[in-house]
């Protein structure tokens, strides 16, 4: 386990050295929130006390801030890592070293998002202290956050296995970004979707790390539902873990070490 700790530490040090990337990413998230806030102010008609789907304008702005903050934590880098390793042939050293690619991806991702995760956890604690004040509920929310992150890494790692069959993975970037913006509820709460569609979409991996996570932090989701989602994520993690390992073994048969 120590070797994975070194992976996380090294990735965190890289993030600190190139901290301007983090600053610009945070600036983009803030700018995107400001644009959305101005747009929704016009939709609300400037009424501070009016409500839409149970959200006041202030609550919606807070929602937008939190969901855009989650975009700093849940990135898409892992989708394209394996594809790049396969394309350049640099996957070969990974196969000889006693390192699990999935675990390395997890800890590398943690190291890259460590600052954002700490800040977000502090925000969760702030909401809990000024909300329910229930320490047990905060632990439950924190567990939800951790499990959603692990599930996210597994989902991205599964998508990343397409790199064994695709020469170029970059065309997936705009597709993934578009799906994330819609299904994670970055622009608006998923409850705003028609025909109760949002109530179903919020349980997809994008929704769990975006809109649903934000509602958990804001206290808009009850304890029982959080517990149910935690159980669902645990089941999903187990299924995706075995599916990833099975597909990885099959995908490695396609690897010829090209470019090494």
Image (cartoon, rainbow, N blue to C red):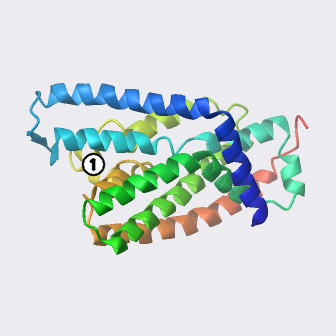
Residue 202 appears in the rendering: no
| Residue drawn at x 30%, y 29% as measured from the top left | 36
The quadrant in which residue 166 appears is: top right
Quadrant location of the C terminus in the rendered image: top right
Q: Secondary structure at mark 1?
A: helix
Q: Is residue 112 above or below residue 221?
A: above
The residue depicted at 87 percent of the width and 48 percent of the height is 92
Q: At 44% across and 51% down in the image, what residue appears?
A: 120
Image location (x, y in percent) of residue 139: 41, 70
238 relative to 183, above or below: below
Give the residue at x 50% y 53%.
118
Coordinates of residue 88 in the picture (x, y in percent): 83, 35
Image spot of residue 192 (x, y percent)? 22, 42
- Taking the image as shown, residue 123 lies to the left or right of residue 98, namely left
Is there any visible trace of residue 259 in the rendered image? yes
Return the residue at label 1. Answer: 197
User: In this rendering, would 154 be left or right of 247?
Assistant: left
Assign the N terminus to one quadrant of the image: bottom right
């Amino acid at each position: 386990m120590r070797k994975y700790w070194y992976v996380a530490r090294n990735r965190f040090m890289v993030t600190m050295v190139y901290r301007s990337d983090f600053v610009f990413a945070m600036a983009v998230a803030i700018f995107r929130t400001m644009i959305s806030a101005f747009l929704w102010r016009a939709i609300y008609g400037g009424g501070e006390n009016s409500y839409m789907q149970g959200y006041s304008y202030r609550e919606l702005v807070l929602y937008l801030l939190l969901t855009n903050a989650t975009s700093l934590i849940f990135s898409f880098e892992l989708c394209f890592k394996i594809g790049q390793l396969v394309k350049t042939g640099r996957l070969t050293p990974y196969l000889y070293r006693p390192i699990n690619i999935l675990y390395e991806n997890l800890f590398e991702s943690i190291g890259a998002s460590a600052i954002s995760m700490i800040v977000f956890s502090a925000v969760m604690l702030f909401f809990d202290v000024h909300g329910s004040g229930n320490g047990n509920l905060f632990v439950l929310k924190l567990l939800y956050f951790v499990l959603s992150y692990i599930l996210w890494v597994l989902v991205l790692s599964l998508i990343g296995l397409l790199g064994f069959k695709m020469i170029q993975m970059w065309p997936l970037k705009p597709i993934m970004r578009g799906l994330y913006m819609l299904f994670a509820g970055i622009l608006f709460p998923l409850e705003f979707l028609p025909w109760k569609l949002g109530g179903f979409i919020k349980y997809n991996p994008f929704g769990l790390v975006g809109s649903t996570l934000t509602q958990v932090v804001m206290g808009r989701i009850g304890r029982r539902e959080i517990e149910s989602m935690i159980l669902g994520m645990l089941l999903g993690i187990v299924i995706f873990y075995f599916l990833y390992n099975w597909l990885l073994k099959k995908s490695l048969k396609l690897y010829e070490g090209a470019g090494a």
